[in-house]
Image: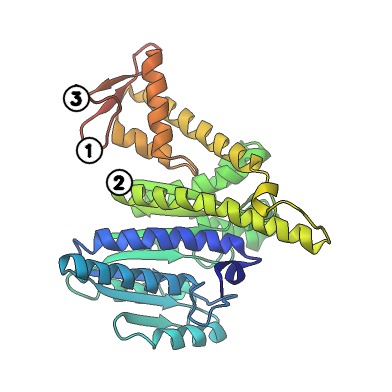
Amino acid sequence: MTEDNLYAGREQTLVKHLILQRYLKRFAMIIGQVWSSITYVDCFSGPWQSRSAEFADTSFGIAVQELRRARDELAERSGKAPQLRCYFLERDADAYERLHGYARTFTDVEIATRNAPLEDSVADIERFVTGVTPKPFSFVFVDPTGWSGFALDRIRPLLLLKPGEVLINFMTEHIRRFIDSPDEQTRRSFEELFGSADFRDQLAEIPVTERRDAVVFEYARTVAAVGRFDYPSIAVVLHPQKNRSHFHLVYLTRSSKGLEVFKDAEKQSMADMEQARAKAQQRKREEKGGRYLFSAEEMHDPVHFQELRDRYLGMARKALESRLRNQIRVPYEQAWAIALFYPMVWEGDVKQWIREWTEQGSVSLEGLGPRQRVPQRDQHHCLVWPSGR
């Protein structure tokens, strides 16, 4: 079955899986050179709506495939073959039976499965991750279908696992629709998601048109602070047929290299997202009886994507300028991380701003060699904002 058939009608899942797939392959290749064991945890495994007999269109299936591929490639290149361990969690009994059956087919990966809610399984996950010597590098994927079931205080131990990284699917569209609900139970569930009610006071001061971004940015900063992650970042996944955000992927790492790899995976997947959206929108037109001479890509209007990217570029540039004005002297690594927190912003954008600022005399650069024109990470390069500007 082709990729188009596997993901027809759920193209947003395709984009999520492409980011995960691209990231995990490089993640395992890098981590496997240093750590002897890698543990992948999938907290809402499913399977849901899978059309592949091999579960190739599921997050757990993709994870096993990419981790094994990286391990085998490492073994061939360098003789290093990290131990692979997976923990798959699913609360639905029927889905769990399929998940457990899949896990039993592998003999070269240690796979534990559990039929229970995430909030009841955190201690068990901790034991699995930390119960081997030497300590493994963990990657925790939290991919819910809504906003409940992963209260911040309950998942805090998973955020604090070291060494480790976390990826959370933040269901923006669902949250946007219900975050202002007067229902007491709904309000309480959002407070549990954020760990407090403080976010409501902050949102009240923000225009309604800006709240979707504000909610996900606040959540990303909150979970990063709780887990003591130095490099949080966000990727946006658009609705296949409508010009709006469907969900965001919140990525948390303590490594600048991890952020670099995640942003590369995001950038590659944005082009695939627009192609998938073009096909989804063409299919919708054809279902209504339309017949067209042009291809889906030719019919697709990229204006919303570009407007959204321009919006995030403006936010990132403003945030970096603000830090420069307040701090005066900012290491390039810090400037880079500030900008790459935002979706659809990449290192090339940051370097373009720096070129513009230096040409205008707004920013000077310290620490560059005689032939260096733009700063690089890990070379003690700094951006300096002249005082008084």
Mark 1 vs mark 2, CA separation in Å: 10 Å
Q: Secondary structure at mark 2?
A: helix
Dots 3, 1 in contact, CB < 8 A? no
Q: Is residue 196 visible?
A: no
Question: Is 255 in front, or is 276?
Answer: 276
Camera-nearest label, 3 or 2: 3
Q: Which residue is mark 2?
A: 256
Q: Is residue 308 visible?
A: yes
Q: Earlier in the sequence, mark 3 or mark 1?
A: 3
Dots 1, 2 in contact, CB < 8 A? yes
Residue type, mark 1 in image: Asp
Q: Where is residue 21 shown, x and y percent of the image?
A: 42, 63
Q: Quadrant of residue 189?
A: bottom right
Residue at the farthest right position:
289
Mark carried by residue 378 = 1
Q: Is residue 133 above or below residue 366?
A: below
Q: Earlier in the sequence, mark 1 or mark 2?
A: 2
In which quadrant is the N terminus drawn?
A: bottom right
Q: Which residue is mark 3?
A: 369
